[in-house]
Amino acid sequence: MQIQDKMIESTKEIFSSMVMMEITVKGILTDHGLLHNSITGMIGLAGTHKGVLAVHIPYAVAMAITSNFLMLDINEITEDVHDAVGEIANMLGGNMKSILSENSRDIDLSIPSTITGAQYNFQSDENVEKVIVEFDTGSGTFLVEINLEK
């Protein structure tokens, strides 16, 4: 099974069990260009595999996801939204660590962090294996991206 397939399976599982949202794959991208009115949660991987896992979510979708996740009515980008997006990146990072690691001890994860903005670019060095999957929540789409050093 390829990283892409495992990433899809892992993301669907986390959204189904933790966020209480059924999501579908909308497509596989090679690039996403500039991100607009979005929040990105990211977590670094270090060890036998080095790279970054990121979740890019437009504001409206991030609020819908956070509302489901926390079972609250969220209608603005608050600290709760940052925390929820960071936690989703953390859960996905943990799953990817298990998938990529022989015994889960040869890869370390960074503390999750988030960035947000009206327009920004998210890119790694050119010498990475990049997988970007677009998911549909019913409330809009979001991206899960992993960049691993070759």
Image (tube, rainbow, N blue to C red):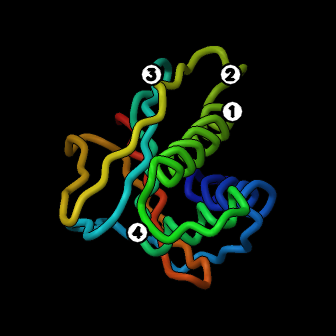
Q: Please, is residue 150 above or below residue 56 in the view?
A: above
What is the C-alpha distance between the residues marked 4 and 1?
29 Å
Reading the image, the residue beneath label 3 is 46
Q: Earlier in the sequence, mark 2 or mark 1?
A: 1
Q: Residues within 10 Å of mark 3 (few under 14, many from 20)?
A: some
Reading the image, the residue beneath label 1 is 98
Residue 59's disc number: 4
The location of residue 86, given as percent across then percent down, is 51, 43
Q: Residues within 10 Å of mark 4 (few under 14, many from 20)?
A: many
The location of residue 37, given as percent across then percent down, is 29, 69
Q: Earlier in the sequence, mark 4 or mark 1?
A: 4
Q: Earlier in the sequence, mark 3 or mark 2?
A: 3
Q: Quadrant of residue 105?
A: top right
Tags 2 and 4 touching, CB below 8 Å? no
At 68% from the left and 58% from the top, the residue drawn is 69
Residue kind at label 2, given as amino acid type: Ser
Viewer-nearest of labels 3 and 4?
4
Q: Which type of secondary structure does the marked residue at label 2 adopt?
A: loop
Viewer-nearest of labels 4 and 1?
4
Q: Which type of secondary structure does the marked residue at label 4 adopt?
A: helix
Q: Which type of secondary structure does the marked residue at label 1 adopt?
A: helix
Residue kind at label 3, given as amino acid type: Ala
Q: Please, is residue 72 above or below residue 115 in the view?
A: below
Residue kind at label 1, given as amino acid type: Ser
What is the C-alpha distance between the residues marked 3 and 1?
13 Å
Reading the image, the residue beneath label 2 is 104
Residue kind at label 4, given as amino acid type: Tyr
- Residue 9 appears in the picture as rendered: no
At 72% from the left and 70% from the top, the residue drawn is 21
In the figure, is residue 59 to the left or right of 102?
Answer: left
Tags 2 and 1 touching, CB below 8 Å? yes
Q: Earlier in the sequence, mark 3 or mark 4?
A: 3
